[in-house]
């Protein structure tokens, strides 16, 4: 079968594309004919060795894939031959990647593709959508009636945070470029602020008791600024950091107001969290939500170029790889 794989971690040029042994499935696994694979920043971290994880070499790259069931193991009852399915937790923690024409995937890590949802659009969205679902529901435990501030809300993760939070019944405030305000309002944001200006001053004036939760998708807003915007018991979800990897903030203000800072990366999510997120993502996609990413499609044979484009931030669209 065709696969994109590495013999050792390192530069994107280490990616090779060619014949790879066909997988055999265990009793709890499903053999999937892969139709499309997403390329995420975390894929470049795993490939480069920047994210430390069990990675038996040679290793097929990629974690998020959509495809058709070819065969099921003896213990699998929830999937059938020919069914469209997706996964977003392969290619790390000792599990093989999915940038291959065939992939053996544990049934517990598979989800059905909702009827009528475009498979490529789905797989382009699931990484950021599942991140938003777990961060908001499990980590920050956002509740109906609370207020969430999403900074940098027009990006891949930002738009998913807006939609998931709105579905949870939260009031969503957003920062973005003004030309994105109308799109964010259509996705569910209550009000948007220009991130080029002093949005924190405006929000502080309008939200007298403070914000319940904040997620900065860019790493460009200081913790000091965001902590000052939080109310008592407010939470910050960290999913990125500034380039200099440094923040300063008022510690006394933080603990006396019982505020929390919680870091999250989906690669450390539990299976239970991933399964919860998969169900939530499918529910929202059935309603036509979360499917707002622009896509660029490349063949498997250009996997190295795709990784280079992602890790150097040369494209804003989501890159999808398909078999040659």
Image (cartoon, rainbow, N blue to C red):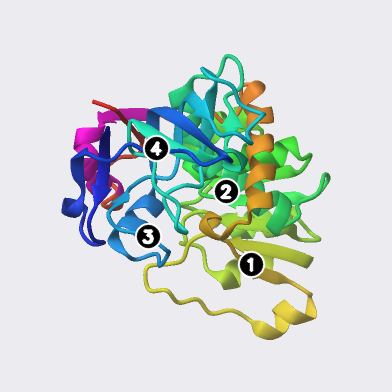
Q: Quadrant of residue 288?
A: top right
Cα–Cα gap, marks 1 and 4: 27 Å
Q: Count residues near mark 3 (Cα–Cα under 10 Å), then give few for <14, some for 14-19, many for 20+.
A: many
Q: Count residues near mark 1 (Cα–Cα under 10 Å), then give few for <14, some for 14-19, many for 20+.
A: few
> Considering the numbered disc 3 on the image, is that residue within a helix, a strand or a loop?
loop
Give the residue pinned by disc 2. Answer: 131
Give the residue pinned by disc 4. Answer: 38
- Residue 15 is left or right of residue 262, and the answer is left
Q: Which mark is first along the chain, 3 or 1?
A: 3
Which stretch appears magenta? 295-310
State which mark lies toward you, 3 or 4.
Answer: 3
Give the residue pinned by disc 1. Answer: 262
Cα–Cα gap, marks 2 and 3: 22 Å
Judge whether 45 appears above or below 31 on screen: below
The question of residue 306 being in magenta is answered with yes
Q: Count residues near mark 4 (Cα–Cα under 10 Å), then give few for <14, some for 14-19, many for 20+.
A: many
State which mark lies toward you, 1 or 4.
Answer: 4
Q: Which mark is first along the chain, 3 or 2?
A: 3
Specify the label residue 55 is tagged with. 3
> Considering the numbered disc 2 on the image, is that residue within a helix, a strand or a loop?
helix
Q: Nearer the viewer, residue 77 or 221?
A: 77
Q: Quadrant of residue 225?
A: bottom right
* Labels 4 and 2 touching (C-beta < 8 A): no
Q: Count residues near mark 2 (Cα–Cα under 10 Å), then give few for <14, some for 14-19, many for 20+.
A: many
């Amino acid at each position: 079968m065709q696969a994109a794989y590495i013999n050792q971690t390192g530069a994107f040029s280490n990616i090779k594309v060619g014949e790879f042994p066909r997988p055999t499935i265990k009793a709890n696994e499903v053999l999937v004919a892969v139709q499309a694979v997403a390329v995420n920043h975390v894929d470049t971290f795993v490939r480069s060795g920047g994210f430390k994880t069990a990675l038996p070499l040679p290793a097929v790259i990629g974690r998020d894939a959509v495809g058709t069931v070819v065969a099921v193991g003896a213990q699998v009852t929830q999937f059938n031959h020919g069914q469209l399915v997706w996964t977003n937790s392969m290619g790390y923690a000792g599990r093989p990647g999915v940038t291959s024409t065939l992939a053996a995937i544990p049934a517990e890590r598979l989800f059905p593709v909702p009827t009528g949802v475009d498979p490529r659009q789905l797989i382009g969205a699931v990484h950021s959508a599942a991140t938003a679902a777990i961060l908001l529901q499990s980590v920050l435990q956002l509740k109906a009636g609370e207020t969430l501030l999403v900074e940098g809300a027009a990006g891949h993760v930002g738009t998913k945070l807006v939609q998931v939070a709105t579905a949870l019944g939260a009031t969503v405030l957003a920062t973005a470029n003004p030309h994105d305000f109308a799109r964010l309002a259509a996705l569910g944001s209550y009000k948007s602020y220009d991130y080029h200006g002093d949005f924190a001053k405006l929000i502080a004036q309008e939200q007298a008791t403070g914000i319940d939760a904040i997620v900065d998708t860019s790493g460009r807003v200081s913790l000091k600024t965001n902590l000052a915007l939080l109310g008592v018991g407010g939470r910050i979800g960290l999913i990125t950091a500034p380039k200099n990897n440094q923040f300063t903030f008022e510690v006394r203000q933080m603990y006396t107001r019982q505020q929390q800072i919680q870091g999250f990366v989906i690669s450390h999510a539990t299976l239970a969290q991933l399964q919860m997120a998969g169900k939530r993502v499918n529910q929202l996609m059935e309603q036509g939500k979360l499917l707002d990413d622009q896509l660029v499609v490349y063949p498997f044979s250009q996997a190295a170029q795709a990784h280079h484009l992602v890790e150097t931030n040369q494209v804003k669209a989501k890159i999808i790889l398909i078999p040659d």
